[in-house]
Image: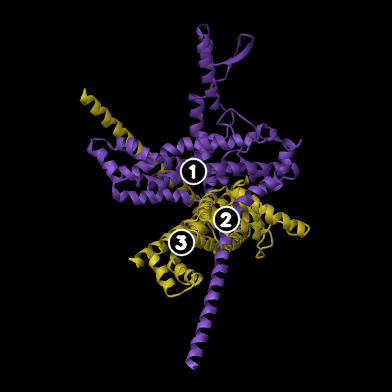
Amino acid sequence: MSNALYLRRRVANMVALCMSMLATLIGLTFLAWILWETLHQGIGALNLKLFTKITAYGEDGGLANAMIGSLIINFIGIAIATPIGVMAGTWLAEYANRTKLGESIRFLNDILLSAPSIVLGLFVYTIIVLPSTAITHGSTTFSGLAGGVALALIALPVIVRTTDEMLRLVPSTLREAALSLGVPQWKLTVQILIRAARSGLITGVLLALARISGETAPLLFTAFGNNYTTFNPMDKMSSLPQMIYQYANDPGEAMHSIAWAGAFVITMFVLLLSLASRLVLSRNKVSHD
Amino acid sequence: MQADQGANALAIAQEQRALKDANHDLLFSWLLKACALLVLACLLGAAGATLWGGRHAFGAFGWHFLGSDAWDPGNDIYGALVPVYGTIATSLIALLIAVPVSFGIALYLSEVAPPWLRTPVASAIELLAGIPSIIYGMWGLFVFAPFFADHIKPWLTDHLGNPPPVQVPWGDGVIPFTPWAVEHVSVIGPVAHLLHKLTWAFGQLFTSDSPFGASILTAGIVLAVMIIPFISSVMREVFQTVPTRLKESAYALGSSTWEVSWDIVLPYTRSAVVGGVFLGLGRALGETMAVTFVLGNAMSLSPSLLDPGASIASTIANQFSEAAGLQKSSLMALAFLLFVVTFFVLLIARLMLRRLALKEGR
């Protein structure tokens, strides 16, 4: 009797543990499958034309203008989000750590972190694209700048959160030492705390960059796309993810392989960024020990 | 005398400097606070902008907008039912798949795997979270959807779907019956009739004559792969917060690993696990690119999960650039619905996650 119960419990345990192993295998299989297809199809389609020719040539072209556009839009996004995000994160960690307003903003920031990016794109469409169309009577509509602002909204919560977390890791003895010497708080923040948490902040910016460089949805109706190279942020601008979206939906086989090559470039970029952010963080840990 | 004057001047200078510092401090804190309030402004602005953009649609259709399955740009009549149904159906399928798998992964990584294997496997799973959604979309469109159409879909329609119906008179009308039911028509009583209707409705979920791989189920599966890393990393993190003495007491009483996980770890972390699931749900509801590629973008309601459909995000991504007037306003209204729903889902998620943190006194 007790033997039967024991056996049943052992079998249940074995079954459960095997299922958990199976679940992990399923997860790893999908990871390997997706990465393999991206590498396999992407490397096969990789050539020099991709980096030198623009999308106006279609099948015979490359993605040069989209890459330039992506760089500019991402740069605008990061350039807007970094100062604002670092300052907001500093306020949360240093000025409002235990206040009600600070707690609520920290809480809402976490929500903004996973808010649907397409809605943020529509928000930027409403506050930038529509007014600029109205003011310039339609000569400026979609623009790289609008795309950059949309990406900034997505990068912002990432930077706010990492800044907040990293500053709270700075030992309070550092603050007390500086304050006891009569250093005003703004100087303490700018010259000591930000410096102490520097590598953490860099990690946050790198993570934010990794997050926005694959974003497509908000760019569809902010930066819109452009078949020619442009460096003017007030112009319509194409970006790598948006070109991939367009080419993948194209019926032509040649377009698909260009799209795969673009997908390969983005994936490599994002993976390298997340690797770099890990390296920055681990090097920081070593130097503190 | 001179020394006294110097000291006096020094004191004045010091006071001025203290005043200046205080002023700068005040300005600095205002600047920081303004930046923090910007986060608030983003959320309110996104809700406000979409509500403002959707005002014509809400005005024209009222509450009917939510319940109507019409999407007819020709006659300028729009309803939210098709995309709302698609969003909810794909997200629920994703949760149905992702929750048990994530639980398995978290269990494996926190209790089962040998310690040297834990970190590499955990970072590999987290790598899945870093892959941009457009890559999931391409993989879904070119690799997974054809695979689904060739291997999974035929099996589902053969084994779970309904065979072509036979029309049989029943009572006042004619109902579609499976051939099996026709054979046994003499023994079908009221209970069997109900049972048959239920199995018929279930079979309808897996009956489809569309030859393509793009469907609500495909999108649900791709979404599941996307949210597995989010849910499993939350679960793994909270599983590690369970006090060791609780687990060890249970082991000492002779519990198996599975019993410890199911009866000790899971109840202790329940609220955070639910939070992690809701976090995944929030992601799934708002996901755009991956879904747009594999959903098929059909603006019609179908009982089958194997038929193409549309979600709120995919509808906006597909139609917004070319839309004008009432259609554009309807898309904005859809975005408002999506934003409000995801806001509350994420709100619940964060509140649940916080409950465990509070319990720990963090």
In the image, what residue type sits under mark 3? Thr
Residue A268 x, y percent position in the rendering? 48, 56
Residue on which the image places disc 2: B39
| Circle 1: element type | helix
- The answer for how far apart the CA atoms under marks 3 and 1 are is 26 Å
In the image, what residue type sits under mark 1? Ala
The residue depicted at 48 percent of the width and 46 percent of the height is B350
Question: Which chain is displayed in purple in the rendered image?
Answer: B
Look at the image and give the colour of chain A.
Answer: yellow
The residue depicted at 46 percent of the width and 61 percent of the height is A203
Residue A270 x, y percent position in the rendering? 49, 56
Q: Does B281 sit left or right of B362 as displayed?
A: right
* Neighbourhood count class around disc 1 (C-alpha, 10 Å): few under 14, some 14–19, many 20 upward: many
| Circle 3: element type | helix
| Mark number, residue B349 | 1
Instruction: Indicate how the structure is coloured in the image.
Output: by chain
Asked which quadrant contains residue A146, the reply is: bottom right
Whether residue A213 is visible, yes or no, is no
- The answer for how far apart the CA atoms under marks 2 and 3 are is 20 Å
Q: Does A186 sit left or right of A174 as displayed?
A: right
* Neighbourhood count class around disc 2 (C-alpha, 10 Å): few under 14, some 14–19, many 20 upward: many
Residue on which the image places disc 3: A203
Q: Are marks 3 and 1 on the same chain?
A: no
